[in-house]
Image: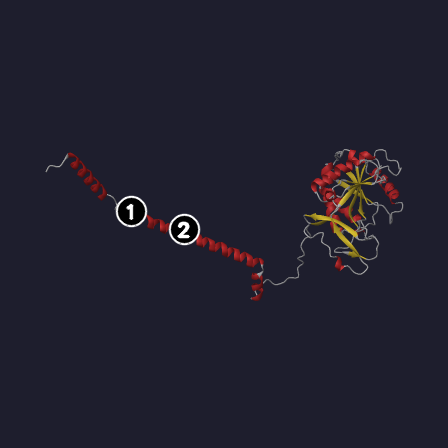
Amino acid sequence: MKESGASRIRDSVLLSEVMMNRNLPVPVGETMSPYIKRRKRREMRSLTRFLALFLAVVLLAALVFCLGKLGVFSFLGGWFGTSEETTTEDTTPVETTTGLYDFDYGKLSEDAFAIVPCDLSARVAGVLFDNRTDYVPEAIVPRALSTVAGDKVTVLVINTHPYEAYSEEASYEYVDGSYVNSEDREKTVAAVADAFIASLAKNGVKAVYVEVATTSGRNSYTAAYEALTNALEEYPDVMYIVDIHRDILIDEDGNMLRPVTNGADGAMAQMRLVVGTDADGAAYEDWESGAAASFFLAERMTAAYPSLMMPTEISTSRLNQHLPVTVFTAEIGACGNRLDEAIRTAEAFGTVFAAAIK
């Protein structure tokens, strides 16, 4: 029986498929799938092992971190005698804002008053001025300071109350109810004035200190006025006078306040500028000009040290600011502050002041 043409064509196609299949590297059909599946399982097992190892490393690192936080390694080091030997070197940390205002009233002696650290900055108070007058200081526009020549004495520095002193280092209480005064120059605002002058010199401004022989507030401004008038005759190029004081801040319970903030090298006494006026009737026609200069300087200080400046006081007295040059009255710290805190502030004040007049 003869094959039909269709049968021959079908057989030819089947033979061609068989011959093509012989040239494949692996059998086709059902035998290909198991080969591919086995390869995927090996890849999955490798990935699983990697993830497990990674997770184990993470867990181990977390465990070591937690044990370190709990001090286990320090304890074991001490147990096996591997801890560092204790030295007698003073390792007291520099005082920082963290904990700076903490105070334990429980440690006060009987009948003692506290010296309380506090933040009295204008930023915290939310006001720029402590106005003791009926004037409106907000209406006065700050004015930039005139520049000075660096090769001449252009600044006079004075302490109208040179006996004003600070609390002893690490003091936290006082018992006699008196303010801190001293005849020892190295413990008073005179030492702060020296630091201010040195800072000016470091920044290219020449200043001299004007002595005034007063031991109390009685007639102190009259004595200071006479001393400054004589100094102005001796140094005709002087353009500025800076009178450095320290404040007296006592709360309603009789505790001394220690206005303080943190600085790069330790705690700094907060400070304020005091603007004189004619509010008490004394002649001082151009007090607004002096106020504008003080406001400008307060702005510069605040820009450099945002937490350092307390609100600027607007006084009823003229404070010798009616002299023929610009006079700044600066209260650096208060009786509750330590001398080193006031000196750091004086150094910063000198740097900013010098930059403002150079």
Residue 94 image position (x, y, % from top left): 68, 53
Disc 1: CA contacts within 10 A as few (<14), some (14-19) or many (>=20): few
Residue that appears at 53% across and 58% down: 64
Residues marked 2 and 1 touching at CB (< 8 Å): no
Q: Is residue 27 left or right of residue 155?
A: left
Residue that appears at 55% across and 57% down: 66
- Is residue 259 visible to us here? yes
Residue that appears at 39% across and 50% down: 44
Residue 151 image position (x, y, % from top left): 74, 37
Disc 2: CA contacts within 10 A as few (<14), some (14-19) or many (>=20): few
Mark 2 / mark 1, whichever is N-terminal? 1
Q: In the rendered structure, which amino acid carries the disc numbered 2?
A: Leu
Q: In the rendered structure, which amino acid carries the disc numbered 1?
A: Met
Report the Cα–Cα distance between label 2 and label 1: 24 Å
Against 321, residue 161 (above or below) is below
Give whichever of 300, 42 is nearer the camera. 42
Q: Is residue 63 left or right of residue 209?
A: left
Residue farthest to the bottom, as pictured: 80
- Is residue 237 visible to us here? no
Residue at mark 2: 47
Residue at mark 1: 32
Quadrant of the rendering where the C terminus is positioned:
top right
